[in-house]
Image (tube, rainbow, N blue to C red):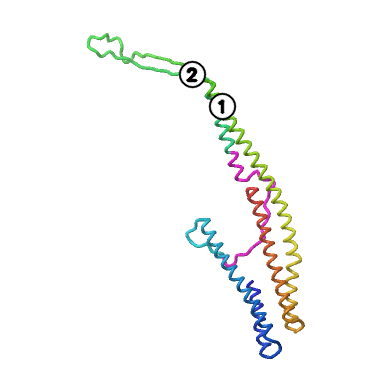
Protein backbone atom coordinates (compact mmCIF):
# COMPACT_ATOMS: atom_id res chain seq x y z
CA UNK A 1 0.00 0.00 0.00
CA UNK A 2 2.89 2.36 0.69
CA UNK A 3 4.25 1.58 -2.78
CA UNK A 4 0.85 2.20 -4.30
CA UNK A 5 0.57 5.48 -2.42
CA UNK A 6 3.95 6.59 -3.76
CA UNK A 7 2.93 5.80 -7.34
CA UNK A 8 -0.35 7.66 -7.01
CA UNK A 9 1.37 10.64 -5.40
CA UNK A 10 3.62 10.86 -8.44
CA UNK A 11 0.64 10.66 -10.73
CA UNK A 12 -1.18 13.43 -8.83
CA UNK A 13 1.84 15.69 -9.39
CA UNK A 14 1.88 14.79 -13.06
CA UNK A 15 -1.85 15.49 -13.33
CA UNK A 16 -1.36 18.90 -11.70
CA UNK A 17 1.26 19.75 -14.27
CA UNK A 18 -1.02 18.63 -17.07
CA UNK A 19 -3.86 20.78 -15.73
CA UNK A 20 -1.61 23.83 -15.53
CA UNK A 21 -0.48 23.35 -19.12
CA UNK A 22 -4.01 22.65 -20.31
CA UNK A 23 -3.23 19.14 -21.50
CA UNK A 24 -6.00 17.61 -19.42
CA UNK A 25 -8.95 18.57 -17.27
CA UNK A 26 -9.50 18.53 -13.54
CA UNK A 27 -11.40 15.23 -13.71
CA UNK A 28 -8.28 13.12 -14.02
CA UNK A 29 -6.55 14.95 -11.17
CA UNK A 30 -9.64 14.65 -8.94
CA UNK A 31 -9.93 10.95 -9.75
CA UNK A 32 -6.26 10.39 -8.93
CA UNK A 33 -6.57 12.30 -5.66
CA UNK A 34 -9.66 10.28 -4.73
CA UNK A 35 -7.86 7.01 -5.42
CA UNK A 36 -4.85 8.15 -3.44
CA UNK A 37 -7.08 9.15 -0.54
CA UNK A 38 -8.68 5.70 -0.57
CA UNK A 39 -5.27 4.00 -0.48
CA UNK A 40 -4.12 6.22 2.40
CA UNK A 41 -7.31 5.45 4.29
CA UNK A 42 -6.68 1.72 3.87
CA UNK A 43 -3.06 2.22 4.92
CA UNK A 44 -4.20 3.98 8.11
CA UNK A 45 -6.55 1.09 8.88
CA UNK A 46 -3.77 -1.46 8.37
CA UNK A 47 -1.46 0.55 10.65
CA UNK A 48 -4.17 0.58 13.32
CA UNK A 49 -4.68 -3.19 12.91
CA UNK A 50 -0.95 -3.72 13.45
CA UNK A 51 -1.08 -1.72 16.68
CA UNK A 52 -4.12 -3.68 17.87
CA UNK A 53 -2.31 -6.95 17.13
CA UNK A 54 0.73 -5.75 19.08
CA UNK A 55 -1.41 -4.93 22.12
CA UNK A 56 -3.13 -8.32 21.88
CA UNK A 57 0.22 -10.12 21.65
CA UNK A 58 1.54 -8.16 24.63
CA UNK A 59 -1.51 -9.27 26.64
CA UNK A 60 -1.19 -12.91 25.59
CA UNK A 61 2.47 -13.19 26.59
CA UNK A 62 1.95 -11.02 29.71
CA UNK A 63 4.73 -8.63 28.72
CA UNK A 64 5.34 -5.48 30.74
CA UNK A 65 6.66 -3.54 27.75
CA UNK A 66 4.93 -3.06 24.38
CA UNK A 67 5.76 -5.66 21.76
CA UNK A 68 7.63 -4.18 18.83
CA UNK A 69 8.15 -5.33 15.27
CA UNK A 70 11.76 -5.16 13.97
CA UNK A 71 12.16 -2.68 11.11
CA UNK A 72 13.57 -5.42 8.87
CA UNK A 73 10.82 -7.93 9.70
CA UNK A 74 9.48 -9.79 6.68
CA UNK A 75 6.75 -12.31 6.02
CA UNK A 76 8.99 -15.17 4.93
CA UNK A 77 7.98 -18.55 3.58
CA UNK A 78 8.12 -21.23 6.28
CA UNK A 79 9.76 -24.62 5.78
CA UNK A 80 7.69 -27.75 6.24
CA UNK A 81 9.02 -29.78 9.22
CA UNK A 82 9.74 -33.49 9.25
CA UNK A 83 6.47 -35.24 10.13
CA UNK A 84 7.48 -38.88 9.61
CA UNK A 85 6.20 -39.77 13.09
CA UNK A 86 2.78 -38.26 12.44
CA UNK A 87 0.99 -37.01 15.56
CA UNK A 88 2.91 -39.25 17.96
CA UNK A 89 4.82 -36.30 19.44
CA UNK A 90 1.79 -34.04 19.80
CA UNK A 91 1.90 -32.55 23.33
CA UNK A 92 -1.77 -33.19 24.01
CA UNK A 93 -1.24 -36.94 23.54
CA UNK A 94 1.44 -36.88 26.25
CA UNK A 95 -1.19 -35.73 28.73
CA UNK A 96 -3.59 -38.53 27.73
CA UNK A 97 -0.79 -41.10 28.01
CA UNK A 98 -0.04 -39.81 31.48
CA UNK A 99 -3.66 -40.31 32.48
CA UNK A 100 -3.48 -43.92 31.26
CA UNK A 101 -0.30 -44.52 33.30
CA UNK A 102 -1.84 -42.99 36.42
CA UNK A 103 -4.96 -45.14 36.15
CA UNK A 104 -2.86 -48.26 35.54
CA UNK A 105 -0.90 -47.49 38.69
CA UNK A 106 -4.15 -46.99 40.63
CA UNK A 107 -5.44 -50.37 39.42
CA UNK A 108 -2.22 -52.05 40.51
CA UNK A 109 -2.47 -50.45 43.94
CA UNK A 110 -6.03 -51.66 44.46
CA UNK A 111 -5.02 -55.19 43.40
CA UNK A 112 -2.16 -55.21 45.92
CA UNK A 113 -4.61 -54.42 48.70
CA UNK A 114 -6.39 -57.72 47.98
CA UNK A 115 -3.25 -59.74 48.69
CA UNK A 116 -2.30 -60.90 52.23
CA UNK A 117 -0.01 -58.58 54.15
CA UNK A 118 2.97 -60.32 55.75
CA UNK A 119 4.95 -58.85 58.62
CA UNK A 120 7.90 -59.93 60.74
CA UNK A 121 9.58 -58.31 63.74
CA UNK A 122 12.51 -58.91 66.04
CA UNK A 123 13.05 -57.61 69.61
CA UNK A 124 16.24 -57.78 71.69
CA UNK A 125 16.34 -56.39 75.26
CA UNK A 126 17.87 -56.88 78.71
CA UNK A 127 16.46 -56.63 82.27
CA UNK A 128 18.36 -55.40 85.36
CA UNK A 129 17.19 -56.26 88.86
CA UNK A 130 17.64 -53.01 90.76
CA UNK A 131 15.01 -53.27 93.52
CA UNK A 132 16.37 -53.94 97.05
CA UNK A 133 16.28 -57.59 97.91
CA UNK A 134 15.52 -58.66 94.35
CA UNK A 135 17.21 -61.60 92.85
CA UNK A 136 20.28 -60.11 91.10
CA UNK A 137 20.58 -62.93 88.63
CA UNK A 138 19.45 -60.65 85.69
CA UNK A 139 22.14 -58.27 84.57
CA UNK A 140 22.89 -56.23 81.44
CA UNK A 141 24.58 -59.23 79.98
CA UNK A 142 21.37 -61.24 80.00
CA UNK A 143 19.52 -60.77 76.69
CA UNK A 144 15.95 -61.63 75.86
CA UNK A 145 15.12 -62.28 72.18
CA UNK A 146 11.64 -62.10 70.70
CA UNK A 147 10.67 -62.89 67.10
CA UNK A 148 7.19 -61.99 65.91
CA UNK A 149 5.60 -62.90 62.56
CA UNK A 150 2.12 -62.19 61.29
CA UNK A 151 -0.15 -62.25 58.29
CA UNK A 152 -3.10 -59.92 57.62
CA UNK A 153 -5.81 -61.23 55.32
CA UNK A 154 -8.57 -58.90 54.01
CA UNK A 155 -11.89 -60.00 55.43
CA UNK A 156 -14.22 -57.81 53.37
CA UNK A 157 -12.84 -58.74 49.94
CA UNK A 158 -16.02 -57.88 48.08
CA UNK A 159 -15.65 -54.14 48.71
CA UNK A 160 -12.00 -54.21 47.68
CA UNK A 161 -12.83 -56.17 44.53
CA UNK A 162 -15.34 -53.46 43.67
CA UNK A 163 -12.58 -50.88 44.03
CA UNK A 164 -10.38 -52.92 41.70
CA UNK A 165 -13.19 -53.14 39.14
CA UNK A 166 -13.78 -49.39 39.36
CA UNK A 167 -10.07 -48.74 38.87
CA UNK A 168 -10.05 -50.99 35.78
CA UNK A 169 -13.02 -49.11 34.33
CA UNK A 170 -11.21 -45.80 34.90
CA UNK A 171 -8.16 -47.28 33.20
CA UNK A 172 -10.25 -48.37 30.21
CA UNK A 173 -11.83 -44.92 29.98
CA UNK A 174 -8.40 -43.28 29.98
CA UNK A 175 -7.22 -45.65 27.24
CA UNK A 176 -10.36 -44.97 25.19
CA UNK A 177 -9.82 -41.22 25.55
CA UNK A 178 -6.24 -41.63 24.36
CA UNK A 179 -7.33 -43.62 21.32
CA UNK A 180 -10.12 -41.15 20.51
CA UNK A 181 -7.78 -38.17 20.80
CA UNK A 182 -5.23 -39.96 18.61
CA UNK A 183 -7.81 -40.63 15.89
CA UNK A 184 -9.00 -37.03 16.10
CA UNK A 185 -5.48 -35.67 15.68
CA UNK A 186 -4.75 -38.11 12.84
CA UNK A 187 -7.85 -36.86 11.01
CA UNK A 188 -6.82 -33.24 11.55
CA UNK A 189 -3.30 -34.13 10.40
CA UNK A 190 -4.56 -35.57 7.11
CA UNK A 191 -6.68 -32.48 6.56
CA UNK A 192 -3.69 -30.26 7.36
CA UNK A 193 -1.54 -32.06 4.79
CA UNK A 194 -4.24 -31.66 2.13
CA UNK A 195 -4.62 -27.98 2.99
CA UNK A 196 -0.85 -27.54 2.79
CA UNK A 197 -0.78 -29.04 -0.70
CA UNK A 198 -3.59 -26.72 -1.78
CA UNK A 199 -1.87 -23.63 -0.40
CA UNK A 200 1.46 -24.70 -1.91
CA UNK A 201 -0.08 -24.84 -5.39
CA UNK A 202 -1.60 -21.39 -4.94
CA UNK A 203 1.64 -19.90 -3.66
CA UNK A 204 3.63 -21.49 -6.50
CA UNK A 205 1.31 -19.79 -8.97
CA UNK A 206 1.91 -16.39 -7.40
CA UNK A 207 5.68 -16.88 -7.13
CA UNK A 208 6.23 -18.22 -10.65
CA UNK A 209 3.52 -16.49 -12.67
CA UNK A 210 1.46 -13.80 -10.96
CA UNK A 211 4.21 -11.72 -9.32
CA UNK A 212 6.40 -11.52 -12.44
CA UNK A 213 3.30 -10.56 -14.40
CA UNK A 214 2.47 -7.82 -11.90
CA UNK A 215 6.00 -6.39 -12.10
CA UNK A 216 5.91 -6.40 -15.90
CA UNK A 217 2.42 -4.85 -15.91
CA UNK A 218 3.53 -2.04 -13.62
CA UNK A 219 6.72 -1.28 -15.56
CA UNK A 220 4.98 -1.27 -18.94
CA UNK A 221 2.12 0.86 -17.63
CA UNK A 222 4.53 3.47 -16.29
CA UNK A 223 6.46 3.58 -19.53
CA UNK A 224 3.30 3.85 -21.64
CA UNK A 225 1.81 6.56 -19.44
CA UNK A 226 4.97 8.66 -19.52
CA UNK A 227 5.12 8.28 -23.28
CA UNK A 228 1.49 9.31 -23.62
CA UNK A 229 0.45 6.01 -25.16
CA UNK A 230 -2.22 5.36 -22.50
CA UNK A 231 -4.49 7.63 -20.53
CA UNK A 232 -5.06 7.85 -16.81
CA UNK A 233 -7.88 5.28 -16.85
CA UNK A 234 -5.72 2.56 -18.37
CA UNK A 235 -2.80 3.50 -16.15
CA UNK A 236 -4.95 3.42 -12.99
CA UNK A 237 -6.39 0.04 -13.96
CA UNK A 238 -2.87 -1.34 -14.42
CA UNK A 239 -1.80 -0.01 -11.00
CA UNK A 240 -4.87 -1.49 -9.33
CA UNK A 241 -4.38 -4.85 -11.01
CA UNK A 242 -0.69 -5.03 -10.05
CA UNK A 243 -1.51 -4.04 -6.49
CA UNK A 244 -4.28 -6.63 -6.24
CA UNK A 245 -1.87 -9.34 -7.40
CA UNK A 246 0.68 -8.36 -4.75
CA UNK A 247 -1.96 -8.33 -2.03
CA UNK A 248 -3.17 -11.70 -3.25
CA UNK A 249 0.39 -13.02 -2.97
CA UNK A 250 0.63 -11.84 0.64
CA UNK A 251 -2.67 -13.56 1.44
CA UNK A 252 -1.43 -16.75 -0.25
CA UNK A 253 1.87 -16.61 1.66
CA UNK A 254 0.03 -16.10 4.94
CA UNK A 255 -2.32 -19.02 4.22
CA UNK A 256 0.67 -21.21 3.30
CA UNK A 257 2.52 -20.35 6.52
CA UNK A 258 -0.58 -21.02 8.59
CA UNK A 259 -0.88 -24.44 6.93
CA UNK A 260 2.74 -25.18 7.87
CA UNK A 261 2.15 -24.01 11.44
CA UNK A 262 -0.87 -26.32 11.72
CA UNK A 263 1.31 -29.27 10.69
CA UNK A 264 4.03 -28.17 13.13
CA UNK A 265 1.57 -28.15 16.01
CA UNK A 266 -0.07 -31.45 15.09
CA UNK A 267 3.35 -33.13 14.68
CA UNK A 268 4.59 -31.66 17.96
CA UNK A 269 7.47 -29.79 16.34
Q: Distance between the residues labelled 1 and 2?
A: 19 Å
Residue 84 is covered by the magenta coloring: yes
Does any portion of residue 8 appear in the rendered image?
yes
For residue 180, which quarter of the picture?
top right
Residue 109 image offset from top left, x and y in percent: 54, 28
Tell me the residue that label 2 is attached to.
Answer: 152
Q: Note whether 83 is above or below 209 in the view shown.
A: above
Graded by Cα atoms within 10 Å as few (under 14), some (14 to 19) or many (20 or more), the crowding at tag 2 reads few
Q: Which region of the structure is painted magenta?
A: 70-97
Q: In which quarter of the image is residue 102?
A: top right
In this view, the mark in front (1 or 2): 1
Q: In which quarter of the image is the N terminus?
A: bottom right
Q: Residue at x 59, y 31 (%)?
A: 169
Q: Position of residue 200 (x, y in %)?
A: 72, 58
Locate residue 134: give its quadrant: top left
Residue at 28 percent across and 13 percent down: it is 129
Q: Residue furthest front?
A: 27
- Decide whether residue 14 is among the magenta residues: no
Whether residue 85 is visible: no
Q: Mark 1 points at which residue?
A: 164
Give the SS element for disc 2.
strand
Instruction: Sort mark 1 into few (<14), some (14-19) or many (20+) by Cα contacts within 10 Å.
Output: many
Amino acid sequence: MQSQDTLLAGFVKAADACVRTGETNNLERATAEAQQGEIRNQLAQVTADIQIAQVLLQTLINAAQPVGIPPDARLDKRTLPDFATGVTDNPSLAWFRQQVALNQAATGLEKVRLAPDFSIGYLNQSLNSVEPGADPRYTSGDRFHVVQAGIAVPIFRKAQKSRVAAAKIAEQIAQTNLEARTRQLEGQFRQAIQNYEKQRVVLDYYEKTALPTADMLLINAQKAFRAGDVGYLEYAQALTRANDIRLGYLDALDAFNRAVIDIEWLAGK
